Amino acid sequence: MGARIVQALIGQNVSVVVLARPDSASISNPLLQGAKVVTVDFADTQAISNIFRENNIEVLVSAISLPGIEAQKPLADAAKEAGVKLFVPSEFGMATEGCKEGFLSEKEHFADYIKGIGVPMMRVFCGLFIEAIPWLARVKYGKFHLLGDQNLPASFSAMDDVVGFIAHVLTSFPPSSLHNTTFRIQGERASLSTIGALYEAADPPIPVIRVDKLPDGSERQTLAQNKFSRGHGSTGWDYYLDRDVPENAGSGNKVWEGHRWKTIREVLDL
């Protein structure tokens, strides 16, 4: 995800500095071509702050995966110290604003931390990446696995659309106008059950199977599908109201005028 964001920003003629851990294999990623890559210990706040100052960093975008969300705190502290104008934390998934329990709450706790130290923030909720649908439904086992009915609408976005949106917003609006904003985007709104029907109609068809338990080794998929079964898969989900607000799902799309968002059928070649 991070390398894709880098490429999207470079495509907008933006100067990009990539922070990477010294032992990171991503350093050799060809998608980083055109960016300045700097290795640093992510726990060393002062070293990170120095890099931000030396390179006049205005906007910090984090693509750290969910298990490493806590590792963003030194980045936030360094951003505060160096006067970075905007921090885009690693969200890029289901809505987390107001989420106080469960595996997604770590992102909300980090957002609270950013607010607490006074660093301006921009959050982007895009639902599930369309490319991750086969992973979620364990298609590799020859069937489209659903926990229960899965008839509630959810938000899905292609990775290219998400990184393109981020690059568009960051290069079209001054950082000051993005302070403490939240964008809820979606490429397509559909239920997992509806998507399963697309798989059944594909050539060759992949049957839908409704189960009480996903195949062994599907802990993360189980957590996600349980979220979907409660409506949390929609970017319109409001934890304060404890319900989906359909008009909020995809409400951020309007700031990318004229863009055609990719469909599930298109991305997955169904």
Image (tube, rainbow, N blue to C red):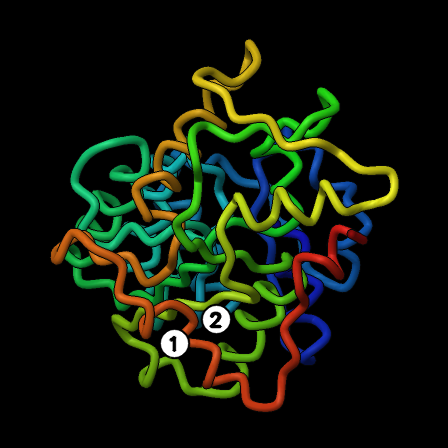
Residue 50: name its quadrant: bottom left
Residue 23: name its quadrant: top right
Helix, strand or loop at label 1? It is helix
Residue placed most toward the observer, 61 or 212: 212
Judge from the rendering whether residue 108 lies leftward or rightward of residue 55; answer left or right. left
Residue 174: name its quadrant: bottom left
Q: Position of residue 77 (x, y in %)?
A: 28, 50
Q: Which mark is residue 251?
A: 1
Q: Amino acid at mark 1?
A: Ser
Residue placed most toward the observer, 128 or 188: 188
Q: Position of residue 262 (x, y in %)?
A: 67, 68
At horizontal 57% and vertical 59% (from top left) the residue drawn is: 157
**Crowding near pointer 1: few (<14 within 10 Å), some, many (20+)?**
some
Q: Position of residue 147 (x, y in %)?
A: 45, 28
Q: Amino acid at mark 2?
A: Asn
**Taking 195 as reference, is 225 above or below it?**
above
Depth check, mark 1 against mark 2: the one in front is 1
Distance CA(mark 1)–CA(mark 2) = 32 Å
At horizontal 33% and vertical 47% (from top left) the residue drawn is: 232
At horizontal 44% and vertical 54% (from top left) the residue drawn is: 154
**Taking 129 as reference, is 244 above or below it?**
below
Sequence-wise, the earlier of marks 1 and 2 is 2
Residue placed most toward the observer, 185 or 206: 206
Q: Residue furthest top?
A: 216
Helix, strand or loop at label 2? It is loop
**Taking 126 as reference, is 94 above or below it?**
above
**Crowding near pointer 2: few (<14 within 10 Å), some, many (20+)?**
few
Q: Position of residue 191 (x, y in %)?
A: 49, 51
Q: Report which residue position mark 2 lands on.
A: 56
Judge from the rendering whether residue 199 lies leftward or rightward of residue 5; answer left or right. right
At horizontal 32% and vertical 74% (from top left) the residue drawn is: 247
